[in-house]
Image (tube, rainbow, N blue to C red):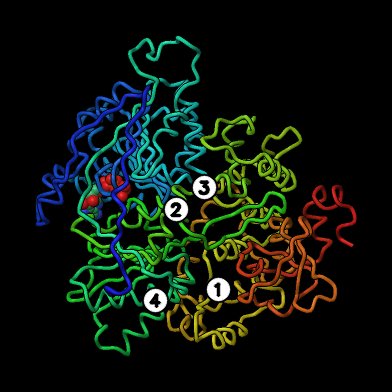
């Protein structure tokens, strides 16, 4: 491996510590973990060895005296698992109050809450619990510490706008700057003005602490006191936790790799041949990459005896829960586990056996163009902050190594320090509906940590009017707007579900909505394209991918959810199990908000009308005489093509709608369905007839 890799020269990034106005604390660095080796210390001893332990008193002092405390500390220093416990020990959960700790991702919420419950010696769901979308593992009068996704806390605000139950809210991994984190930060700042007793902790390993402090600093007039009457400082405090867990040796590629999937596979095999024991965590971009890499590795394992000790496990959000949880179990005796993951494993997670991290340097990111109103999921370089987080998944319980599949020069000169906040590169439809549901009417005047573009806001409002979610006064409509705000999905999917209740095809549309929640129900990959295309033809419906999903779902049920059936038909078994899981959850929500659950049997026209009711804005027309099947979107006249994975690829019907776009050499529509253009006028007369009267001719 030596000829391909060279150790990084980068010094560990300096911690942000200086702030002229805030309460800044420097304490001596702690490297106790590195020196102490790793054995079977009791949990209490392990807790005391973490770098954050030396700061326990300082943290509690700052939280006591400051409305907002910003804590920056290396990955693995103990922020997530320890600080909430210190707060409980100091009495912040006494008298029926609650402490919340938010995470951007569901998997992290489950993993850290179960670790903290274990450390506290309590049953998960009793004193320590978690709530994620579709799942609440807490007890009303018993839980004092709740791990939640940012989105769940926003939903709680619909019933309790001031979050009165909580004494302290810790927003963890704040550097990720998901849309939900940004909305949450803006709302928490608002809540602080009404509830000065609420304490906020903003934590991350890679956050720009100064700009976060600027955001939370109240705008004050000259000479106004910094301390309120009750002695609480409104000026945010910044604390830098010095010290790291175990050392992680960073290695960069000597030369750039052209195929990062192949490079990742070769690196894993070299690690297996040359390095001592320890599991490997590989970061790729999405399900297709992961499946391709897993396929290549498994092929090699079957043919090469030297590699038979490898066990490959994929990890992405579209996997069913039980399969995701496999990554937390130890590798079978004498085997080396290789987890191949999206950035779902990038923050907060501790996978105990991981010693080696392989970082492709890429992730799938949303990019939204408000002019064409098109959102693309694009494979793009990650930021340096992300690269540090990825490396930080090693070195948590013993020293580790990170192999970056890019050069150091590229890292230093081409990768941005931090990513662009999601709010500045996304379609804002879901975000606006959430704010409206929380009673925030002046969305353009909202205090954002990073402002979204006014064009994107206006576009979102336009779509929400056309979906009949907002009325002429820009308020949520009743009942549609309020029902949609209750469904924790993209409003276009929610609208499709609500329309299906009126059209009598809820059973079918719930299946389609669930299938749209996974990246792909098909197995694809290098070398099996022909067979998988042929298998797809057995289910292909002339109406397009949505009706094809229904055919596959029916077949899966008739086979009694058999993995052999999936294997035979090139259907992704994991994805189908996930579809069944999500469908169950959606059914419960549909019942809760009073939708009529009905099947339309074989009347596919109503199914297509329901899909159109949600996705009319993504309508396209085939360009006349286009030899390569070019379509133009009705809204932005954007050039798009049917994705090769669609059953309508090369069929090229005149009118179609799609669910999403992916950009590679061209913009491709994924999940495509034929439509009758007159349905567009039925579904959204304002949108198509009044604004653009000649559009449909
Ligand atoms: N499930 C677990 N099993 C074993 N050790 C764990 C587990 N979870 C956490 N730890 C130990 O606790 C340490 C601190 O973890 P914690 O998640 O609190 O750190 P953090 O500072 O929040 O890191 P990050 O910024 O990466 O989220 C880990 O480095 C590891 O040593």
* Image point (33%, 32%), residue name: 98
Q: Mark 2 packing: few (<14 Cα in 10 Å), some, or many (20+)?
A: many
Q: Mark 4 packing: few (<14 Cα in 10 Å), some, or many (20+)?
A: many
Taking depth in this image into account, of 199 and 31 the one nearest to the observer is 31
Taking depth in this image into account, of 195 and 264 the one nearest to the observer is 264
Which residue is label 3 attached to?
Answer: 420
Give the number of the mark in front: 2 or 1: 2
Above or below 56: residue 387: below
> Could you tell whether 179 is left or right of 124 in the image?
right
Give the number of the mark in front: 3 or 1: 3
Counting residues from the N terminus, which is met first, the one under dot 3 or under dot 2? 2
Give the number of the mark in front: 1 or 4: 4
- Inter-mark Cα distance, 2 to 1: 39 Å
Counting residues from the N terminus, which is met first, the one under dot 4 or under dot 2? 4
* Image point (45%, 76%), residue name: 292
Callout 4 touching callout 3 (CB < 8 Å): no
Which secondary structure, mark 4? Answer: helix
Image disc number at residue 553: 1
Which secondary structure, mark 1? Answer: helix
Image disc number at residue 49: none
């Amino acid at each position: 491996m030596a000829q391909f890799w060279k150790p990084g020269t980068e010094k560990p990034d300096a911690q942000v510590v200086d702030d002229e106005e805030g309460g800044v604390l420097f304490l001596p660095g702690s490297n106790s973990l590195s020196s102490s080796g790793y054995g079977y210390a009791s949990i209490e001893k392990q807790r005391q060895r973490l770098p954050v332990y030396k700061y326990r008193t300082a943290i509690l002092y700052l939280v006591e005296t400051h409305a907002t405390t910003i804590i920056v500390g290396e990955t693995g220093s103990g922020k997530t698992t320890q600080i909430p416990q210190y707060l409980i020990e100091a009495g912040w959960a006494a008298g029926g109050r609650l402490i919340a700790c938010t995470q951007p991702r569901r998997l992290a919420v489950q993993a850290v809450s179960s670790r903290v419950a274990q450390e506290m010696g309590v049953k998960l769901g009793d004193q320590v619990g978690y709530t994620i979308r579709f799942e609440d593992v807490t007890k009303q009068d018993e839980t004092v510490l709740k791990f939640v996704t940012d989105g769940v806390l926003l939903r709680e605000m619909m019933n309790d706008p001031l979050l009165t139950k909580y004494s302290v809210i810790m927003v963890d991994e704040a550097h990720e700057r998901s849309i939900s984190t940004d909305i949450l930060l803006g709302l928490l700042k608002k809540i602080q003005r009404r509830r000065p007793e609420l304490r906020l902790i903003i934590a991350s390993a890679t956050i720009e602490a100064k700009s976060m402090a600027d955001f939370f600093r109240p705008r004050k007039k000259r000479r106004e006191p910094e301390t309120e009457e009750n002695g609480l400082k409104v000026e945010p405090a910044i604390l830098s936790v010095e010290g790291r867990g175990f050392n992680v040796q960073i290695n960069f590629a000597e030369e750039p790799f052209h195929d990062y999937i192949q490079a990742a596979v070769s690196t894993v095999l070299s690690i297996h041949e040359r390095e001592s024991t320890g599991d490997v965590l590989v970061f790729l971009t999405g399900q297709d990459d992961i499946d391709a890499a897993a396929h290549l590795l498994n092929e090699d394992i079957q043919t090469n005896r030297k590699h038979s000790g490898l066990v490959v496990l994929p990890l992405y959000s579209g996997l069913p829960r039980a399969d995701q949880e496999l990554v937390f179990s130890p590798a079978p005796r004498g085997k080396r586990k290789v987890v191949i993951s999206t950035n779902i494993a990038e923050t907060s997670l501790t996978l105990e056996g991981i010693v080696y991290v392989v970082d492709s340097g890429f992730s799938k990111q949303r990019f939204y163009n408000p002019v064409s109103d098109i959102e693309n999921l694009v494979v793009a370089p990650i930021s340096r902050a992300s690269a540090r987080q990825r490396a930080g998944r090693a070195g948590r319980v013993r020293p580790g190594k990170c192999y970056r599949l890019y050069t150091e020069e590229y890292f230093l000169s081409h990768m941005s320090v931090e990513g662009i906040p999601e709010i500045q590169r996304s379609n804002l439809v879901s975000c606006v509906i959430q704010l409206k549901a929380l009673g925030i009417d002046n969305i353009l005047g909202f205090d954002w940590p990073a402002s979204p573009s006014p064009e994107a806001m206006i576009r979102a409002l336009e779509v929400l009017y056309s979906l009949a979610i907002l009325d002429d006064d820009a308020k949520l409509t009743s009942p549609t707007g309020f029902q949609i705000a209750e469904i924790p999905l993209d409003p276009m999917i929610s609208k499709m579900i609500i329309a299906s209740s009126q059209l009598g095809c809820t059973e079918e549309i719930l299946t389609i909505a669930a299938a749209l929640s996974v990246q792909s129900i098909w197995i694809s990959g290098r070398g099996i394209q022909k067979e998988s295309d042929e298998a797809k033809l057995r289910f292909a419906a002339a109406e397009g991918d949505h009706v094809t999903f229904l055919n596959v779902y029916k077949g899966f049920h008739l086979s009694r959810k058999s993995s052999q059936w999936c294997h035979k038909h090139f259907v992704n078994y994991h994805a189908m199990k996930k579809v069944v899981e999500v469908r169950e959850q959606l059914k419960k929500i549909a019942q809760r908000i009073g939708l009529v659950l009905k099947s339309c049997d074989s009347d596919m026209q109503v199914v297509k009308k329901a899909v159109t009711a949600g996705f009319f804005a993504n309508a396209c027309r085939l360009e006349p005489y286009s030899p390569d099947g070019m379509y133009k979107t009705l809204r932005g006249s954007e050039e798009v093509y049917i994705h090769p994975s669609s059953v309508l690829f090369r069929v090229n019907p005149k009118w179609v709608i799609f669910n999403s776009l992916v950009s590679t050499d061209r913009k491709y529509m994924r999940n495509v369905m034929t439509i009758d253009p007159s349905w567009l006028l039925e579904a959204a007369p304002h949108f198509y007839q009044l604004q653009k009267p000649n559009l449909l001719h």
